[in-house]
Image: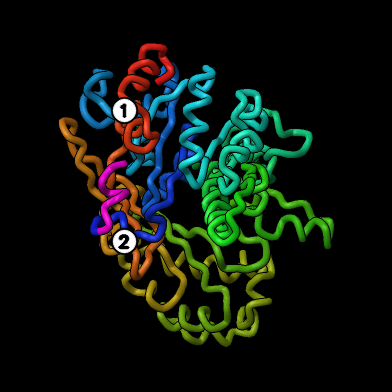
Amino acid sequence: MDSSATDPDSANSRRPLSGVVVLDITRVVAGPFCSMILADLGATVIKIENPKEPDYARDFPPFVGNADDEDSRFSAYFAQYNRHKLGLTLDLSSEEGKEVLRELVARSDVLVENFRAGVMDKLGVGEANLRAVNPRLVYTAISGYGQTGPYRRRPAYDNSAQATGGLWAQNGYPDRPPVRVGTIIGDMAATMYAVIGTLAALRHAEHTGEGQLVDVSQQDSVMTLTESSVVSYTVEKKIASPLGNAHPFVRPYELYPCADGYVFFGGYTDKFWRLTCAMFGQPELADDPEIDTMAKRFDATVYEERVHPLLRGWFAGRTKAELEEMAADHVPLSAIKTVDEIVADPHTAARDMIVDVEYPGLGELRMLGTPIKLGLTPADARGVAPRVGEHTEMLLRSFGGMSDERIAQLKAAGVV
């Protein structure tokens, strides 16, 4: 293995998942992001790609280096979800490739895959097959619809999860067609639950020697993000529908225009409303009998005729920065920031949420850090992603225990 995974004095060895070996047979985002979080936390992650068809996120823009030259560029998109990993190529359609995987599984703690349900079984290396090799293996499967149920074999993307998980139908504006959430939230949600499930199963395996399946569905994950929509329907038969920037049961709690953009203001409680009135020079409004309680301010007519005009007037002549400086330490008011503002924000820097990583010969990549902040054993977000199969020979030799002769035979046969 690489020295960072085995050296007791290395930074990696002081991270919480040091010594855990993860086989990553995933691509694009939901799977790679899951295993990358584990890598940030110290696990040794081996990214396994088909030598003939590697992760196609490697071709997603933007690129570090020369974007017009495939040999001198590297996908920043791919890099952001595959840092710290060791790259190995393996053709799982071949019998030799399946046997190599089983040998690696025997020495590993976790396997993460994000194929459709049944694909790994069809290849002959599904959970049951691999558990026979390693009974303590944690087998994490991320898919569109899960490993059970009538939809389990359907292909799916993030939009599939947003559509079938209920999020798409309730996002947007009431007088327009529904709008997808503007990021791959189905992938991201599945990632988070997969990490949680993997860590829980890993703890169980460490205590009992018994591995298990971690079955995470993008659809299930998105359903949990729909807040009160399920209980609103089961209790009151209300079907959640688009509300724009409004909230279903509190006001004020939405977007408001200001001099140079927009801010979010959520001072709906009586305490925050009183503070806001005082801050903007009209403390007497906190005792106005038409708007002096949270319940009165939530009334749609009262809100539109009294509360909303007040807020628009208070905010219109001030910039985002002025409003934050004036109010953000006291009431829930936040500038709605664009990505350039986020990257330049001093709080972002203080939280180490943008990290700089040097890709030799290509240049520097600034990418997302990690939101997981541990006081004693911090995660490490600064790492490079591997080239296709970059560590294949080293891994087969030092981790797989294979001879140079066998490695040469596997290469000659196109297995690696």
Q: Which residue is mark 1?
A: 393
Q: Which residue is mark 2?
A: 14
Q: Is residue 214 above or below residue 409?
A: below
Tally the numbered discs: 2
Q: Is residue 251 visible?
A: yes
Which of the two discs, 2 and 1, sits closer to the camera?
1
- Please name whichever residue, 283 or 58, is drawn nearer the observer in this view of the structure: 58
Residue 140: quarter of image? top right
- Please name whichever residue, 94 or 227, is drawn nearer the observer in this view of the structure: 94
Residue 398: quarter of image? top left
Give the image location of residue 412, x and y in percent.
Answer: 36, 12
Q: What amino acid is at disc 1?
A: Glu
Residue at 63% x, 46% y is 213
Q: Is residue 16 magenta?
A: no
| Label 1 crowd bin: few (<14), some (14–19), many (20+), radius 10 Å | many
Which residues are the magenta region? 1-8
Q: Is residue 407 above or below residue 17?
A: above
- Secondary structure beneath dot 1 equals helix
Instruction: First in sequence, mark 2 or 1: give its number.
Output: 2
Q: Quadrant of the C terminus?
A: top left
**Does 235 sit left or right of 352 as displayed?**
right
